[in-house]
Amino acid sequence: MTFFYNKVYIDETATVCGPYEKMGPLRRFMDKTYDDLYFGEKSFEKAEIKSVKDSLVLLMKKSSTLKNEIDLVVGGDLLNQITASTYGASEVGNSFIGIYGACSSSVLGMIIAANFIQANFIKNAVCLVSSHNMTSEKQFRYPTEYGAPRPNSATFTATGAACSLLTKEKTSIKVECATLGKIIDYNQNDPNDMGRVMAGAAIDTMVKHFRETKRSPKDYDLILTGDLGIYGKEIVIDYMKKYYDIDLSENYNDCGVMLYDLDNQKNIKAGGSGPVCSALVVYSYIYDLLKNKKIKRVLFLATGALFSPILIYQKENINSICHAISLEAI
């Protein structure tokens, strides 16, 4: 299902990241960085909540918007009961919607907010996501204190928070259209190979988007997935070429590959992941490119692995999903 918008715009964005992201190639585009994973707090969970609060404070300041002027906040993360979003955004906005789309939450939140604005139900909305390497790793795989080795196919959960302010007031960047994805099961069950798990969802939504909009990769200056990492990215490129005769070699990249220096940050392995990974890339570097008219139109496809560790132990497959949104400089 694809939605088209004619009065939804991005007013501002804000990004906060941790030490590993700070060492990556996009550091200068981040609004705030931390040198350690605790962010001055006593636990990793509280550190993630602080990153959400920091990003919201920055967004309000950059957009000259008061907290009580926000009609709606849409937020999601990886903590149980999306607690980073609810605790972090508890003092902002008049209404709140909590979402769980795993790593696809950034685009899912934007689609929900954009639909509310397009329908004239609200004037503005904040879309926020967060994740933390230490909180998500121990929740979805194993406590990091175990020091268990990670295979080369494993992705690295990004640490930080990112948010955007969508509005009906015209700005230089338009939310042009969006495509909702469906749940995909490609018979994958390895939680240490998220790229392979989510690649099928990225392919399915990308093909659906091109068909429903009657577009091709040539209609976009840049096509981004997030977060497939180096192996998932290769699968998408090969599969799209072999089965759909669609060449992505000119203008496609993956946010999980872009966020880190994979040649020198060896502990990252296959690339970044987590709800905030793709948002950190899009709300900083890509937003800057659009704002400065260096690119015209971007197709952003956020992917998510929808799984529970309990079901993995019960030998169930890992479902995935992908949602797409088109951003345009005007």
Image: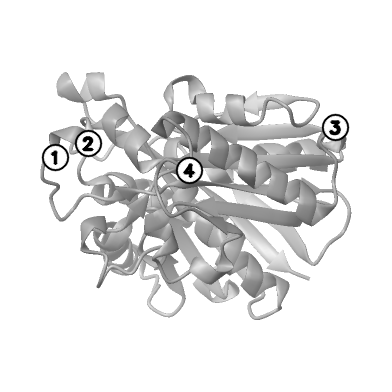
Name the one closer to the observer, 145 or 96. 145
Q: CA distance from mark 4 to mark 2?
A: 18 Å
Residue underneath mark 1: 147
Q: Amino acid at mark 4?
A: Phe
Q: CA distance from mark 4 to mark 3?
A: 26 Å
Q: Earlier in the sequence, mark 4 or mark 2?
A: 4
Closer to the eye: label 4 or 2: 4
Q: Earlier in the sequence, mark 4 or mark 3?
A: 4
| Residue 144 in view of the camera | yes
SS category of the residue bearing label 3: helix
Q: Earlier in the sequence, mark 1 or mark 4?
A: 4
Horizontally, is 176 left or right of 213 in the view? right
Residue underneath mark 4: 39
Position of residue 160 relative to residue 30, above or below, is: above
Task: Locate residue 243, reporting x and y percent.
Answer: 30, 62
Which mark, by number, is residue 144? Answer: 2
Q: CA distance from mark 2 to mark 1?
A: 6 Å
Residue underneath mark 3: 68
The residue that appears at 54% across and 70% down in the rendered structure is 28
Q: Amino acid at mark 3?
A: Asn
Labels 3 and 2 touching (C-beta < 8 A) = no
Residue 312, quarter of picture: top left
Closer to the eye: label 1 or 3: 1
Closer to the eye: label 3 or 2: 2
Q: Amino acid at mark 1?
A: Gly
